[in-house]
Amino acid sequence: MQFMLILALFSCHEKKTSSNQNLKMNNMTSKNYTTTITVDKDSSSAFNSIKNFREWWSEEIDGNTDKLGETFFYHYKDVHLCKIKLIEMVADKKLVYQVIDNEFNFTKDKTEWIKTKLIFDLSSEGNKTKIVFTHEGLVPEYECYNVCNDAWTSYIQGSLKNFIETGKGKPNGKEGGLNAELVEKWRLSNK
């Protein structure tokens, strides 16, 4: 997965200026990133698995990913650092996380994800569960869109689906070597 992210970073050609960011966030014609999976598990199992980001997204997460009102810190080397807060939770039906801080090292506007939302809508379909994941605010006009599209598709359709169904996801592993000072700054800022 790390190789896919690096490859996608180099293939990203879209450009935008930060002055257009707010317009794009409010542009109703922009299409948010979304993907759907159906898993062979009940909605309660799927719901609890989604909240366990360390098992399907990244082992490099600090903080609670499953408690309403709590913020967690995610980083992938110095490529992507962000803080995400669980802002809505409807048992076995819906989870909404808001990105409260973000920094990419591969875009002109380092803050593209700020104020976007990660939304997981769950519904039962017989003995299975349908999960619609939407990254609200992640739109094609963003410079990071192609990279994020590829990454989210891999994480949701691959790692998360596998984790829910088998108990084994494919999260990014512990990296080591990331500038410890940078990580500490991000952990402490904007708590």
Image (cartoon, rainbow, N blue to C red):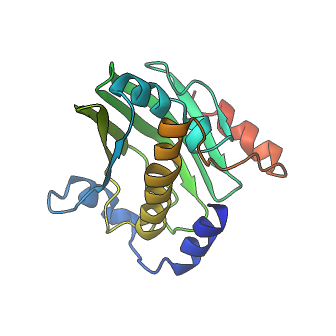
Q: Which residue lies most toward the right here?
A: 177
Q: Is residue 164 above or below residue 144?
A: above
On screen, residue 90 versus residue 54, left or right, reads: left
Nearest the viewer among 128 and 11 is 128
- At x 62%, y 26%, the residue is 63
Q: Nearer the viewer, residue 18 or 158?
A: 158
Left or right side of 170 for 92: left
Does any portion of residue 190 appear in the rendered image? no
Give the percent coordinates (x, y) of residue 188. 67, 31
Q: Residue furthest left?
A: 28
Residue furthest front in the image = 127
Where in the figure is residue 187, as x and y percent of width and height? Answer: 67, 34
Residue at 61% across, 49% down: 170
Q: Quadrant of the C terminus?
A: top right
Q: How many marks?
A: 0
Image coordinates of residue 112 in percent, x first then y, are: 43, 56
* Point 59% across, 68% down: residue: 4
Q: Quadrant of the N terminus?
A: bottom right
x, y percent for residue 32: 27, 56
Between 108 and 140, the one lying in front of the other is 140
Asked which quadrant contains residue 18, the reply is bottom left
